[in-house]
Image (cartoon, helix red, strand yellow):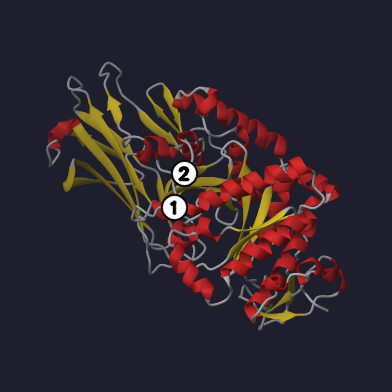
């Protein structure tokens, strides 16, 4: 049986000439079959039963209101909408509350990592489109655990675990069920994610549920150092080569791709397949999709970040979209949108002047004012995130969570806050308390200095530090003080969380 669809066979120009072109057909066919699941209205109904979409929608609308207030922008030009914001929260919810990563099993009796082998699925597993089953085995007690790699997203709504394949598959289904235009993006170098069309921004947004990121398409090439070749997006109504969105070195991608298939052949095949998928649509529907596709091709002509050196921050992704959108994602640091935040201490009559941060509520209290989000009042920060442990009901700031953290990188996290005293704000004493907790060989260092770090004083964690201005070993230049925290150390793959700043229980409203 030929894997080449009938409608392509009539055109000899579309015939594959080598193995990798042949494999292209097989992949296209299997992913188009997969994305059909997302259109099943019965399954979509099941999705809406498990996703807290009402609450997420209310939150998104509220966030939109806040966002409009914070940037003082009239509705017309904000460049994003509550559906975009809902998408960010949906990804976050999916990763943190719904789906679980699975790539190894530990024997619950011996606490030993089990070895795995690949076996043939049984009838039940085949029914849910598991092509392979991982069988985990404990070499001490012989206990086994089956992990079928289900491809049917309906089943994944129940099992809720796997690797990127399962994650992206289930997440794309959820997007479709919540009425987003969504496609499954398959990266030939072994990763899968989702793209969602933003009506407000008139473009496709990259969404990676495994990473809890939205609209950072360069993360793979710049962050993960992947050498991409083909990234193909699949939906019920189109197949699109979206590789160009994920690279800022198009000529290098072209060179690599030339080894496996002819560019013209690929684009002809994808166009033909897309036309065929759209046969059942009305002509206005087809026109609309054609326009969307055209705009996307125009987008691909611009090479993201071509003019810039991709630095650490940009490695997280191209900065695009309106200011509101960039703020909403919190992926762009506040510093890039405005100056570094400084606590201006202007009113000496408020005594004592109080600055607190409550990690559980993720809010600062500065005198009577409340500022939401730890990032908002930071002067500078690097490699820091706010971690919420739903299971232990704890939260804290830590270094950025990664799946492949190794102590040898021992990536340091830094966060600092700046205070600036008004000229007539004559202070004599300051009290500083930092709640920290470290595990294994994690370390947290706290420094107080002015302008430069040549001379500083060290602040002790979990104690009240009384700092007297008259006893400082340095001059307070321009009335400014910087309080800097460094998170380092850590053992094993969870080393990133072995230094915890402001650790507190989620149920504590105050600390
Ligand atoms: Zn065992």
Screen quadrant of the N terminus? bottom right
Q: Are marks 1 and 2 in contact (CB under 8 Å)?
A: yes
Q: Residues within 10 Å of mark 2 (few under 14, many from 20)?
A: few
Ligand 1 image-quadrant field:
bottom right
Percent position of residue 360, x then y? 51, 38
Dot 1 or dot 2, earlier in sequence: 1
Which numbered marker is on residue 304?
A: 1
Mark 2, residue position:
320
Percent position of residue 416, x then y? 31, 43
Above or below 436: residue 323: above
Which of label 1 and label 2 is nearer to you? Answer: 1
Percent position of residue 460, x then y? 29, 46
The residue at the point 44 percent across, 58 percent down is 248
- SS class of the residue under badge 1? loop
Q: CA distance from mark 1 to mark 2?
A: 9 Å
Percent position of residue 357, x then y? 42, 35
The residue at the point 52 percent across, 58 percent down is 244
- Classify residue 463 as left or right of residue 494: left
Q: Residues within 10 Å of mark 1 (few under 14, many from 20)?
A: many
- SS class of the residue under badge 2? loop
* Residue sitting nearer the eye, 293 or 63: 293
The quadrant in which residue 150 appears is bottom right
- Total marks shown come to 2
The CB of the residue at mark 1 lies under 8 Å from ligand 1: no
- Classify residue 360 as left or right of residue 315: right
* Residue sitting nearer the eye, 292 or 500: 292
Above or below 85: residue 111: below
The CB of the residue at mark 2 lies under 8 Å from ligand 1: no
The residue at the point 35 percent across, 34 percent down is 338
């Amino acid at each position: 049986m030929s894997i080449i669809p009938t409608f392509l066979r009539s055109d000899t120009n579309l015939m594959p000439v080598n193995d990798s072109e042949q494999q292209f057909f097989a992949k296209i066919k299997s992913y188009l079959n997969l994305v059909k699941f997302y259109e099943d209205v019965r399954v979509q109904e099941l999705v809406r039963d498990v996703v807290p979409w009402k609450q997420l929608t209310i939150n998104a609308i509220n966030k939109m209101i806040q966002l409009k207030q914070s940037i003082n922008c009239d509705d017309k030009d904000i460049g994003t909408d509550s559906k975009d914001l809902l998408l960010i929260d949906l990804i976050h919810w999916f990763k943190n509350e719904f789906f679980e990563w699975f790539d190894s099993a530990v024997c619950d009796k011996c606490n030993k990592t089990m070895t795995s082998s690949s076996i043939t699925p049984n009838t039940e597993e085949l029914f849910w489109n598991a092509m392979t089953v991982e069988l985990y085995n404990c070499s001490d007690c012989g206990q086994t655990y089956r992990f079928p790699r289900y491809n049917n997203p309906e089943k994944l709504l129940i099992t809720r675990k796997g690797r990127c394949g399962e994650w992206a598959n289930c997440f794309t289904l959820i997007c479709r069920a919540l009425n987003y235009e969504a496609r499954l993006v398959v990266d030939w170098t072994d990763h899968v994610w989702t793209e969602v069309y933003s009506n407000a921004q008139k473009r496709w947004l990259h969404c990676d549920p495994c990473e809890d990121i939205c609209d950072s398409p360069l993360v793979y090439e710049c962050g993960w150092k992947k050498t991409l070749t083909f990234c193909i997006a699949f939906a019920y109504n189109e197949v699109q080569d979206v590789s160009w969105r994920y690279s800022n070195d198009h000529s290098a991608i072209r060179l690599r791709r030339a080894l496996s298939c002819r560019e013209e052949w690929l684009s002809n095949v994808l166009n033909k397949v897309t036309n065929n998928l759209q046969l059942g649509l009305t002509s206005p529907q087809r026109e609309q999709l054609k326009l969307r596709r055209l705009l996307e091709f125009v987008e691909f002509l611009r090479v993201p970040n071509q003019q810039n050196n991709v630095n650490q921050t940009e490695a997280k992704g191209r900065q695009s979209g309106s200011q509101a959108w960039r703020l909403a994602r919190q992926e762009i640091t506040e510093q890039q949108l405005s100056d570094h935040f400084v606590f201006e201490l202007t009113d000496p009559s408020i005594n004592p002047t109080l600055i607190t941060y409550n990690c559980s509520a993720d809010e600062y209290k500065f005198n009577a004012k409340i500022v939401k989000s730890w990032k908002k009042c930071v002067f500078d920060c690097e490699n820091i995130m706010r971690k919420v442990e739903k299971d232990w009901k704890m939260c804290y700031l830590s270094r950025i969570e990664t799946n492949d953290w190794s102590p040898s990188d021992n990536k340091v996290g830094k966060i600092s806050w700046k205070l600036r005293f008004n000229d007539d704000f004559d202070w004599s004493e300051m009290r500083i308390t930092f709640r920290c907790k470290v595990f294994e060989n994690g370390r947290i260092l706290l420094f107080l200095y002015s302008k430069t770090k040549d001379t500083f004083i060290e602040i002790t964690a979990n104690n009240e530090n009384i700092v007297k201005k008259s006893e400082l070993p340095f001059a307070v230049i321009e009335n400014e003080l910087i309080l800097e925290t460094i998170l380092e150390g850590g053992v094993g793959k969870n080393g990133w969380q072995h230094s915890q700043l402001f650790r507190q229980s989620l149920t504590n409203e105050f600390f």
